[in-house]
Amino acid sequence: MSLSVTSLLSRLTLEQDDKLNVLLSAAATESKKSGDPLAVRFKPGIREYITLASAKLGISASEFINILIEGVIRETLSPFQTRATQVVERFQLLMDAHGLNITDVATLLSPWNIGLSVLESRERTMDYLTDPLLSEIAEWFSINKSWLTAASSSPIVAPGNNPDWHKLALQISNKIADVSLKALPQIILIRDTLAPSVVHFSYETLIGVCLITVKLKNGFPLRVAEYLGEQIPYGGHEQLFIDFMAYCGVLQKKRRAIVTTCTTDVSSLKLLSSGKVLPVMLLDNRLNQNYLNQWEKEELNLLHYPEKYVTEEWLKEIDNLN
């Protein structure tokens, strides 16, 4: 996929780290300097940010600047045309983020008469991306249709806090009961690396929950990642959280799901929580770069020995859910 302003900004979001954030904050306080506008004189902080960000993306600083400026000018002068262009760019980004090559996409969209001859042409692809098809794609990938139609900047509708860990267990059970699943679902539990471990039941410990499933769609095994929200194991949520961990542990023992526990930086959790990133992009990015670390042994005991931490009634309820 060629690098567009859509794909550049999506990838840039994933590469954001504390150092880049510090540079942006510092640049905001630097004084403006006059000069030839075509010379593009950046503040020192912005200049260093561009250098670091472009290096992380594997492109030159000049290419980085050109893509951004052209995108802004295009959106300013031709907003309607830009929105049409963004639809196909976001469609391509979505396919690329899920690791689908052009033949995979052709197989997936074959019921809509979209084959290789259509996909090789950007203009023809745009003609086929109708509202009913975009609605179908949004449902398949569990994303925000408004983002796919270029009406929103957030690819996911932010799920927010989970009000009840028991309801989340029911939600997951309903999702993994789908007969079209072609592989064991994966539940990923994420907490902030710097936060206290979950067994301390601290208000500072935010735990996010992701679900990865592989479903058969039009004869193609489609891997989809969803972010289901977050909650703290504090303020009345302590036992509910323990119950949820026991639920995950039972699923794993029965080989109904794979359960992965990990820690990551707080900025990654914020991206997932805000809905500003495709979950599959962030998870694959962090997993491939070994950003994720497993929880401590004491935390894992909640998964490995569920019968020690919950009531018989809840264990029976878990059996009923599965």
Image: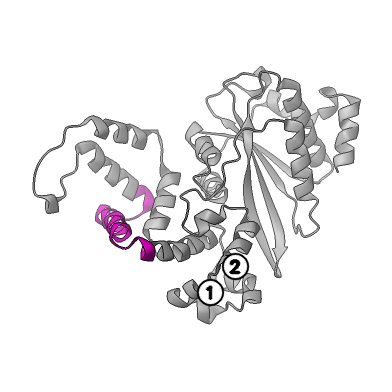
Of the pair 263 and 282, the residue shown nearer to us? 282
Q: Position of residue 75 (x, y in %)?
A: 33, 58
Label placed on residue 128: 1
Residue 301 in view (yes/no): no
Q: Residue at x 75, y 59 (%)?
A: 182
Amino acid type, residue under disc 2 in the picture: Leu
Which stretch is magenta? 55-81
* Mark identifier at residue 281: none
Mark 1 and mark 2: Cα distance apart in space: 8 Å
Label 1 with label 2: CB-CB less than 8 Å: yes
User: What is the number of callouts on the image?
Assistant: 2
Instruction: Sort mark 2 into few (<14), some (14-19) or many (20+) by Cα contacts within 10 Å.
Output: few
Q: Above or below — where is 107 with respect to 215? A: below
Among the two numbered marks 1 and 2 on one chain, the one whose residue lies closer to the N terminus? 1
Q: Nearer the viewer, residue 61 or 294?
A: 61
Asked if residue 181 lies left or right of residue 291, the reply is right
**Residue 147 in the figure: left or right of residue 183:** left
SS of the residue under disc 2: helix
Percent position of residue 262, x then y:
61, 35
Q: Is residue 43 left or right of residue 98?
A: left
Q: Residue 31 appears in which quarter of the rendering?
A: top left
Q: Residue at x 51, y 79 (%)?
A: 118
Quadrant placement of the C terminus: top right
Residue pointed to by mark 2: 133
Classify mark 1: residues with Cα within 10 Å, few (<14), some (14-19) or many (20+): some
Residue 254's quadrant in the figure?
top right
> Is most of the magenta stretch helix, strand or loop?
helix
Q: Position of residue 227 (x, y in %)?
A: 61, 43
